């Protein structure tokens, strides 16, 4: 996608052909800073501290992290240890474990001297496939938006950031929105601010603004009210892990949006690349690990002060304890359907298998 006319991906290889470039997402929207990663440890830190975030992007970042690790030492023990370090960085998004496993399957059996080239080739394929899958999700969701439009404005509510910054390019939930906008459909997005880290306010609003998509930032608590008043035509969110039975883990607060959407009769769609489906589990509430992050993300907030400086301030008494579950699970029964790279389907095992019969 473009930033002020210049095309970017969220992760790419430097001109040197081996080090990895990322956009530091913790600095957005205050400043646009590109970082260079040269070691597996730096890349693991970037994932853990959310300099890169979003399920598909952390999968691609982990794949490139293994390339950097192998470049330093291509031995089997180093490969396995690197995989272990990366797996522990963030537990909920299955794309991370999926990409690491894919790299291990490709690299383990090779002699060490052939691993580095093979690793970069595989990481490149993971990134390229992600872009192609998200473009296909965009097409599948575009039909949905075009159908809802019928010549009038379509209002879509989204949560967190499932845009191009969360993937290698295009995004998942935002891909259909970008394509609808590019195709001349009058689309407007209600952007949940997405406390505690405010990915909606900081990242989704920034992305949509850079692309010229009309949008309105709302508090996380406003969505139900807007849905009741008929102001939302559909909800589209991304996901970090979908179970075989169609349960959806996504950013904390997604479940409440799904409940409100069901009560208000608003379609609730989830954009899912196949790399986000965990075919090994069924019950999302029992089986998906939910990341617990630092209490300081809840008690403090960062923003631009009136004097122009970027400041972090405390929101509550110094001694107030806080809890920070970063994701929740929306049961399949609350999901109207999935938008995948192979088209749309019901949020159920049968629906998913109709598009991905190889997992029967
Ligand atoms: O904690 P984050 O910012 O990594 O969470 C991101 C989300 O929850 C996204 O909605 C999800 O990863 C889908 S990204 C296409």
Image: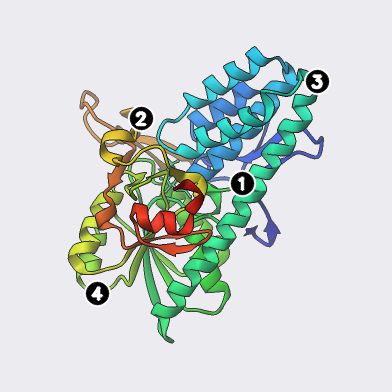
Instruction: Indicate how the structure is coloured in the image.
Output: rainbow
Circle 2 packing at 10 Å, graded few (<14), some (14-19), many (20+), is: some
Front in this rendered view, residue 98 or 155 = 98
| Quarter of image, res 315 | top left
Residue at the disc numbered 3: 113
> Along the polypeptide, which appears first: circle 1 or circle 2?
1
Distance CA(mark 3)–CA(mark 2): 39 Å
Distance CA(mark 4)–CA(mark 2): 35 Å
Distance CA(mark 3)–CA(mark 4): 61 Å
SS at badge 4: loop
Residue at the disc numbered 1: 10
SS at badge 3: helix
Distance CA(mark 3)–CA(mark 1): 29 Å
SS at badge 1: loop
Q: Percent from the top left, x then y, of residue 358?
A: 51, 49
Distance CA(mark 1)–CA(mark 4): 35 Å
> Tag on residue 300?
none
Residues at circles 4 and 2 in contact by the CB criterion of under 8 Å: no
Residue at the disc numbered 4: 230
Please state which of the two labelled residues, at mark 3 or mark 1, is closer to the viewer.
3
> Along the polypeptide, which appears first: circle 3 or circle 2?
3
149 relative position to 178: left or right: left
At x 57% / y 36%, what residue is drawn?
Answer: 99
Circle 1 packing at 10 Å, graded few (<14), some (14-19), many (20+), is: many
> Along the polypeptide, which appears first: circle 1 or circle 4?
1
| Quarter of image, res 327 | top left
Q: Percent from the top left, x then y, of residue 285?
A: 26, 39
């Amino acid at each position: 996608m473009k930033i002020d006319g210049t095309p970017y991906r969220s992760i790419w290889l430097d001109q040197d052909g081996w080090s990895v470039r990322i956009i530091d997402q913790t600095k957005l929207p205050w400043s646009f800073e590109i970082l260079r990663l040269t070691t597996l440890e730096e890349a693991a830190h970037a994932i853990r501290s959310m300099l890169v975030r979003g399920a598909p992007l952390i999968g691609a970042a982990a794949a490139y992290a293994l390339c950097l690790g192998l470049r330093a030492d291509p031995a089997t023990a180093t490969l396995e240890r690197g995989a272990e370090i990366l797996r522990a960085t963030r537990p909920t998004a299955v794309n991370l474990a999926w990409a690491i496993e894919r790299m291990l399957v490709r690299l383990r059996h090779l002699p060490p001297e052939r691993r580095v080239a093979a690793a970069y080739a595989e990481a490149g394929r993971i990134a390229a496939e992600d872009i192609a899958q998200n473009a296909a999700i965009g097409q599948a969701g575009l039909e949905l938006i075009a159908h809802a439009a019928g010549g009038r404005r379509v209002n879509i509510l989204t949560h967190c950031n499932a845009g191009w910054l969360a993937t290698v390019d295009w995004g998942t939930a935002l891909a259909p929105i970008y394509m609808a906008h590019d195709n001349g459909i009058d689309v407007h997005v209600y952007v949940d601010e997405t406390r505690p880290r405010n990915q909606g306010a900081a990242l989704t609003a920034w992305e949509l603004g850079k692309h010229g998509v009309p949008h309105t930032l709302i508090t996380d608590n406003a969505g139900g009210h807007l849905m009741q008043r008929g102001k939302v035509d559909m909800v589209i969110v991304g996901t970090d892990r979908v179970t075989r039975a169609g349960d959806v883990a996504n950013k904390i607060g997604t479940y409440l949006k799904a409940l409100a959407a069901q009560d208000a009769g608003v379609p609730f769609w989830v954009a899912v690349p196949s790399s986000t489906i965990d075919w090994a589990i069924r019950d999302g509430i029992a089986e998906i690990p939910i990341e617990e992050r630092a209490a300081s993300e809840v008690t403090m907030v960062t923003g631009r002060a009136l004097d122009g400086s970027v400041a972090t301030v405390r929101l509550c008494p110094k001694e107030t304890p806080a809890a920070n579950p970063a994701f929740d699970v929306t049961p399949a029964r609350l999901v109207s359907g999935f938008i995948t790279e192979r088209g749309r389907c019901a949020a159920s095992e049968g629906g998913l298998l109709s598009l991905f019969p190889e997992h029967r």
